[in-house]
Image (cartoon, rainbow, N blue to C red):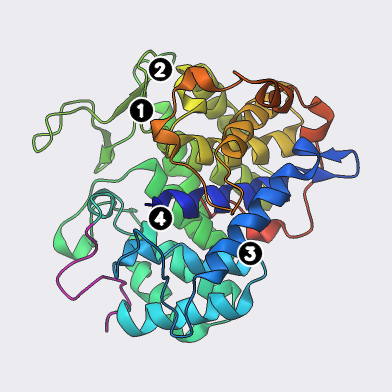
């Protein structure tokens, strides 16, 4: 059975890396990324029915089976299928208040929805905006306005939610950039800057929860865990650094403020110093690849470009002939580079990862 959510993420990540890492000097892996992205997009499009359903093993009529599809399909140039799925989302998940939920009483069966409430909303609104589907974009954006001040992660501020994560902040910041709301984008960038400034042990730890202006370094009472990325551990929620790094780089491009590009680079340096599993994890590697390719393209930083290459090689390693991907979670990190084919992929010349941006840069990093 295909891991549907992971499949969307891999295809979106590959598409974004292709956009960021193509130039007159060459392409990452001599076009293999583009080929993999095209195969994955073709597979997805072939399984979209005329009523906009995604007919594939592992897919359910849950918001989290659909919310990434319109943007992925639109970016791939599959406009008909993108619109069919967006119609399906509008009919089945768009609520009267502009929120998107599986049902009136349930955001999603996915546990991720409890911690990243607006993650799915942002994906859908971005897709609808870029597709000029204002029948979906307008109510969706109006609903999200309440999150544009303090960026709460767990639910609407009207229901008392105040805690936030840098990933939530970055996603809403990107949406603000897309719709030209520079005041909100600035608030998002400044809040991520504050997250970084407040870290008590920045060489080793990154705490990623803040509540009412204070960094939360204590165990969560519900889960008995500390929300922190510890670079000495074998795994972590690295997306809370990857996605903010990509947003800060995009904000720099919009404003020219060097401080935010420097912060983006520092976040990636931290990630690059984490356990090597960051290059071989189900949900982390895709986001890391996109952020590194974006920041590396802007800066030409050889170390960051090398991160993008290594992470992208892992994505390619999971490709099946039909365009699907094996679940990277079942692979041993030690298997990466174990064959001559993988070794050659990882040794692609650095000139292929130091390019100018593609003209379609507005498609951005939102597939991650």
Q: Residues within 10 Å of mark 3 (few under 14, many from 20)?
A: many
Q: How crowded is mark 1: few (under 14 residues within 10 Å), some or many (20 or more)?
A: some
The answer to which image quadrant residue 233 occupies is top left
C-alpha separation, residue under disc 3 versus residue under disc 4: 18 Å
Q: Residue 231 carries which label?
A: 2
Tell me if 61 is positioned left or right of 71 in this view: left
Secondary structure of residue under mark 4: helix
Residue nearest the viewer, comparing 104 with 168: 104
Q: Which of 359 and 152 is in front in this view?
A: 359
Q: Give the range drawn in magenta.
A: 95-109
Q: Nearer the viewer, mark 4 or mark 2?
A: 4
Q: Which of marks 3 and 2 is nearer the N terminus?
A: 3
Residue 75's disc number: 3
Q: Mark 1 = which residue?
A: 236
Q: Could you say whether the residue bearing mark 3 is in a helix, strand or loop? A: helix
Q: Exactly how many numbered labels are in the figure?
A: 4
Question: At 38% from the left edge and 77% from the top edge, which residue is drawn?
Answer: 89
Residue 34: x and y, percent? Answer: 72, 50
Of the numbered discs 3 and 4, the one sitting upstream in the chain is 4
Q: Is residue 236 magenta?
A: no
Looking at marks 4 and 2 on the same chain, the residue that comes earlier in the sequence is marked by: 4
Does residue 293 appear anywhere in the picture?
A: yes
Q: Given the current orientation, which residue lies at the most extreme right position?
A: 24
Q: Is residue 95 above or below residue 257?
A: below
Label 2 to label 1: alpha-carbon separation: 8 Å
Q: Is residue 148 visible?
A: no
User: Left or right: 330 with respect to 78?
Assistant: left
């Amino acid at each position: 059975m295909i891991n549907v959510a992971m499949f969307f993420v891999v295809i979106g990540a590959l598409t974004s890396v292709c956009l960021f890492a193509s130039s007159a000097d060459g392409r990452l892996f001599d076009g293999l990324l583009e080929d993999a992205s095209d195969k994955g997009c073709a597979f997805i499009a072939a399984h979209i029915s005329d009523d906009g359903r995604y007919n594939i093993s592992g897919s359910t009529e849950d918001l989290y089976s659909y919310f990434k599809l319109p943007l992925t399909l639109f970016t791939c140039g599959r406009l008909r299928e993108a619109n069919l799925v967006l119609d399906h989302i509008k009919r089945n998940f768009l609520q009267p208040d502009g929120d998107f939920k599986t049902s009136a009483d349930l955001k999603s069966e996915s546990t991720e929805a409890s911690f990243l409430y607006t993650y799915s909303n942002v994906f859908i609104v971005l897709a609808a905006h870029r597709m000029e589907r204002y029948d979906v974009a307008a109510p969706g954006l109006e609903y999200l306005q309440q999150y544009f001040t303090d960026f709460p992660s767990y639910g609407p501020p009207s229901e008392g939610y105040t805690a936030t994560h840098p990933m939530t902040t970055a996603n809403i910041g990107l949406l603000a950039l897309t719709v030209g709301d520079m005041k909100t984008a600035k608030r998002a960038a400044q809040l991520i800057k504050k997250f970084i400034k407040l870290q008590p042990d920045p060489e080793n730890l990154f705490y990623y929860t803040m509540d009412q202006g204070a960094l939360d370094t204590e165990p969560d009472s519900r889960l008995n865990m500390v929300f922190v990325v510890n670079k000495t551990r074998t795994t972590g929620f690295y997306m809370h650094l990857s996605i903010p790094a990509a947003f800060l780089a995009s904000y720099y491009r919009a404003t020219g403020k060097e401080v935010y590009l420097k912060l983006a680079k520092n976040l990636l340096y931290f990630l690059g110093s984490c356990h090597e599993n960051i290059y071989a994890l189900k949900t982390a590697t895709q986001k890391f690849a996109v952020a590194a390719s974006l920041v590396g393209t802007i800066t030409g930083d050889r170390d960051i470009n090398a991160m993008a290459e290594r992470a992208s090689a892992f994505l390619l390693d999971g490709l099946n002939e039909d365009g699907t991907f094996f679940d990277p979670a079942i692979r041993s990190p030690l298997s990466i580079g174990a064959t001559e084919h993988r070794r050659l992929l990882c040794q692609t010349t650095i000139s292929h990862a130091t390019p100018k941006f593609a003209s379609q840069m507005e498609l951005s990093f939102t597939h991650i």
